[in-house]
Image (cartoon, helix red, strand yellow):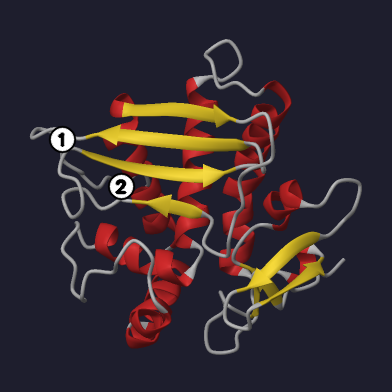
Amino acid sequence: MVQRKTKRQHYVQREYIKNFCINNTDSVNAYNICAGNEKKLKPTSLCVIKEMYEISGNLDNRIENHLKEFEDKGIQQIKKIVDFESINGDIFTNEDLKSLYQYVFLQLIRTKSGQLVFQSIKENLDLKFSKPSKHVSNSELYKNSEIINRNIKWIHDNMNEFDDVIDSLWIAFHDSMRFGLYVSEQPLLITSDCPVDTDVIPGIYNPCMCYLKMALTPRILLDIEIVMNDNLKIKFIKTRS
């Protein structure tokens, strides 16, 4: 049977957005910061762009399908956190934490602003464009639209190398990663179309530490901190011949 191609592609995973649905409904309260209004919308209608990860109109879903392999593993770890409200070693193996980290990192670089972060990592932290602020403006995205499109094409054409970058970051940092959870009694947290708050480029904002923070539900915040030191360097590996 021929697999249907996905044209409407989410840059924030629908399964993740469902964690923010209003109680006993299949909708979320979505605030449009540009229009200044709020609507109840289903996750299928949020954070989606037509053929965002396709190249020159060639609808092959190559990137979409590949990212799904990582995200299917990662979302299972999110579900465990939601169920247990814990991230201790009795529940999570080292491989589980790797899947969780990779999931969060992919939710960062799936977005257009995250593509600018990925550009800096891919080029060994040597930024070739003006350094984006923590919250990338629309003007910054527009100014770097060519870089964003070039990155998407690079991922599409170099899937093995893309995996190598993801693996290299885990190998370089996992011993110095600290995984933490903040759990509130009341629903205090929101998410956005760029769900990961980050200072993931070492040395630009804080020379000693970088972090990834992501609200998993209205009550649970995941905090991944990476402690930096002078001897810690990223060495990009090739895991395939």
Which residue corresponds to the image point at 52% horizontal and 36% vertical from the top-left? 222
Up-down relation of residue 10 to residue 78 (above or below):
below
Whether pointer 1 and pointer 2 mark residues with C-beta atoms closer than 8 Å, the reply is no
For residue 6, say whether it is visible.
yes
Side of 110 where 190 appears, left or right: right
**What x and y, as percent, mark residue 124?**
19, 57
Which residue corresponds to the image point at 83% horizontal and 60% vertical from the top-left? 27
Up-down relation of residue 37 to residue 25 (above or below):
below
**Which amino acid type is marked by label 2?**
Lys
Return the disc, 1 or 2, that comes first in the chain's sequence. 1
**Marker disc for residue 232:** 1
Label 2 element class: loop
Front residue (pair 12, 159) = 12
**Which amino acid type is marked by label 1?**
Leu
**What x and y, as percent, mark residue 145?**
39, 84
Front residue (pair 141, 94) = 141
For residue 3, say whether it is visible.
no
Q: Which residue is mark 2?
A: 238
Side of 56 where 140 appears, left or right: left
Displayed quadrant of residue 217: top right
Residue at the farthest top position: 90
Label 1 element class: loop
Crowding near pointer 1: few (<14 within 10 Å), some, many (20+)? few
Crowding near pointer 2: few (<14 within 10 Å), some, many (20+)? some
Q: Nearer the viewer, mark 1 or mark 2?
A: 1
Front residue (pair 153, 227) = 227
Side of 215 where 208 appears, left or right: left
